[in-house]
Amino acid sequence: MSAETVVRLAVDCMGGDHGPSVTLPAVESFLARHPDAEALLVGRPEAIARARGWPRCRLVEAQEVVAMDDSVEIALRRKKDSSLRVAVSQLKPGADGRPAADVCVSAGNTGALMAVARYVLKTVEGIDRPAIATVMPNAKGGYTTVLDLGANVDCLPEHLMQFALMGSALVTAVEGVDNPSVGLLNIGEEAIKGSETIKQAGELLRAAAAQGLLNFHGNVEGNDIFKGTTDVVVCDGFVGNVALKTSEGLAAMLSGMIREEFSRNLLTRAAALVALPVLQRFKTRVDPRRYNGAALLGLQGLVFKSHGSADAFAFEQALARAWEAARHGLLDRVHRGILATSRGGQTSVSPASPLTMPPPAVSA
Amino acid sequence: MSAETVVRLAVDCMGGDHGPSVTLPAVESFLARHPDAEALLVGRPEAIARARGWPRCRLVEAQEVVAMDDSVEIALRRKKDSSLRVAVSQLKPGADGRPAADVCVSAGNTGALMAVARYVLKTVEGIDRPAIATVMPNAKGGYTTVLDLGANVDCLPEHLMQFALMGSALVTAVEGVDNPSVGLLNIGEEAIKGSETIKQAGELLRAAAAQGLLNFHGNVEGNDIFKGTTDVVVCDGFVGNVALKTSEGLAAMLSGMIREEFSRNLLTRAAALVALPVLQRFKTRVDPRRYNGAALLGLQGLVFKSHGSADAFAFEQALARAWEAARHGLLDRVHRGILATSRGGQTSVSPASPLTMPPPAVSA
């Protein structure tokens, strides 16, 4: 997809803790800023009626809603006309061989979204398991992309290798970084550290790097995520989920403590007033809403997941990330990255920028 | 050991990034505050000479030093007269059947310390693998004890169960909490979440709780560490290490950002001056040096590990934690906890406070 093409987003308007009261204003603001975007608004007709007639919008009816605590089974088997499922289905090629939308965004529950997306779209050939990737801010002023974040609790070395390829493709597409560096999350930098799975994954990654398929930095540790040592950090879903949630917990505790200290007495309240602009700037920099929008990678369709508790500002960030990914052909990049590896590196892919080249031809 | 007994600490004075320049002042200050403590100062004679004649101190010579980057092999096989090993050896019963020290503290490299301690002291009967436990501050104003932190990268459910017992004993001994609550670190609160290992560990923990052997809260997530949902959080060493390092990385990034924002220009510098007392209080509350001192649990001897980069203040905290643990008979508590479980709960251990009771008698 070239940069000039219109990007069509299918939006699950009913998903998340707040549904249309958050998703609709977010879409409205997003479309105002992105004249080359169109939206398919999926939801209960009465709930999304007020968007009727909005420019570059089309309403798509879905009678059911997947609740945030619905099980995967209910989402998959009972609620076949849910906004979540109908939104994802917009990515399937229609009668004309073309899908109605280029990317889908939902704030619905993660397990249900992954299961439905996997069932409806299927995985890309060469990918055993889709992964969830998100960005965390780093000390370099940029972002570190971390995957997997919970889709896969037990991983084989091959899965970690696939995550590395998909994460690289994502960073190139969304952040515009050529040949992003990849770190393997471990408990020490030395190659001999970690579990057997991690050591074997390290070997696969080194071999792929030697073939110019990706830019492998080596092992990284937990603190490297926030240092920004590498563009991508790869780990299994259990470890990634714990790292993400632990960080959320620490950030919440620290901001609670700062608030507490500044509201202790009259003197500290006065200090807070003076320090307010500085604290506000700091708060903006670390605002988790700015990093909202996790990519579900490895599917035959682009799906982005917003945090369930997102407000309109946060949901709009997820829409923007999804739009950016679609605009820069993330899906094609993932396909090509996987294809190159499955051919054992015997491709014409350039070592400098493996994922920005046209589909590789087998050179051997 | 009763609260009145003198506690004898064996201190590896050469360990850590700074050696005697940090360890000796820390010991001096610690002993001044703890009149019921004695220290065995282990190190090169010339390096620790200035402590000769200090009250309640005895110098123990060791000619070698384990470097922070020495491999486990070198620490274990080549440097048999290292300060690290000699300090740990003070915990072995002497000719009179009594060890020279009650607890050992070292800031030496973790891998070497664990390997030497395991070789010299052996594990407690019923413990397959020793674990490393540390505390993290939580939003409730207390501490959460987390283990394992890197000693064991692949764990069986039984190991996680043993960590829970050892962690409970530690919290009772050091924090004085009766019947501490234990959470199993997972990627969701529901019992069906997580890997097979975690699910089975959950079953073991529920069974042990039903028998009154420990106080199992259930699954917890990464953010619960800092929320303070439970007193103890149990996980495998890979996950624990990543959680700890990720937290360190986030804390470092955030404090760097706060510093950056307050030193942006003259106005923000002025604001910093006004806010200084408040920021200072906040800094003190989250100062990682206050939480220094990780316990190596499951060995036939009490070993505490200080951060390698500790300054004198931080090293003194580790000495204080070690002293507290020894004073309250942590070793006996671990023994008893394990013994009770290996007897399948058919003991006289009270459900309300399993680890503060005298050694259980088999009631069946």
Image (cartoon, coloured by chain):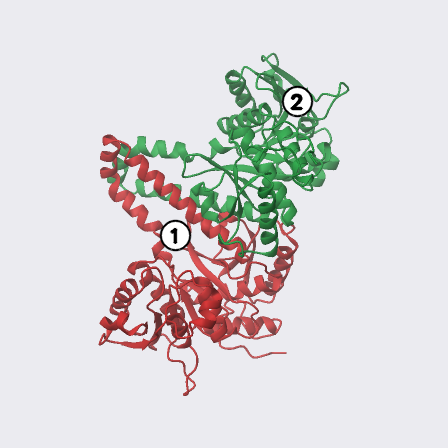
Chain colours: A red, B green
Question: Which percent across, then down, holds residue B292?
Answer: 51, 32
Along the horizontal axis of the image, is A270 left or right of A229? left
Query: Which residue: 51% across, 62% down?
Result: A151
B353 or A11: nearer the eye? B353
Query: Which chain does tag 1 point to?
Result: A
In this figure, what is the number of numbered marks? 2
On the rendered structure, is B182 left or right of A306?
right
Quadrant for the N terminus of chain A in the image = bottom left
Q: Amino acid at mark 1?
A: Gly
Q: Residue A79 versus residue A7: which sits nearer the camera?
A: A79
Apparent side of residue A296 relative to residue B47 in the rendered image (left or right): left
Classify residue A247 as left or right of residue A129: left
Report x, y in % for residue A346: 61, 74
In the rendered structure, the residue with mark 2 lies on which chain? Answer: B
- The answer to whether marks 1 and 2 sit on the same chain is no
Q: Label 1, secondary structure: give it.
A: loop
Quadrant where the C terminus of chain A sits is: bottom right
Q: Which residue corresponds to mark 1?
A: A141
Residue B285 occupies which quadrant of the picture? top left
- Say if mark 1 contacts mark 2, CB within 8 Å: no
Q: Name above or below for residue B261 compared with residue B30.
A: below
- In percent of width and height, residue A33 lies at 26, 67
- Residue drawn at (54%, 14%), measured in percent from left and top? B35
- Height in image: B274 above or below A129? above
Q: Which residue is mark 2?
A: B101
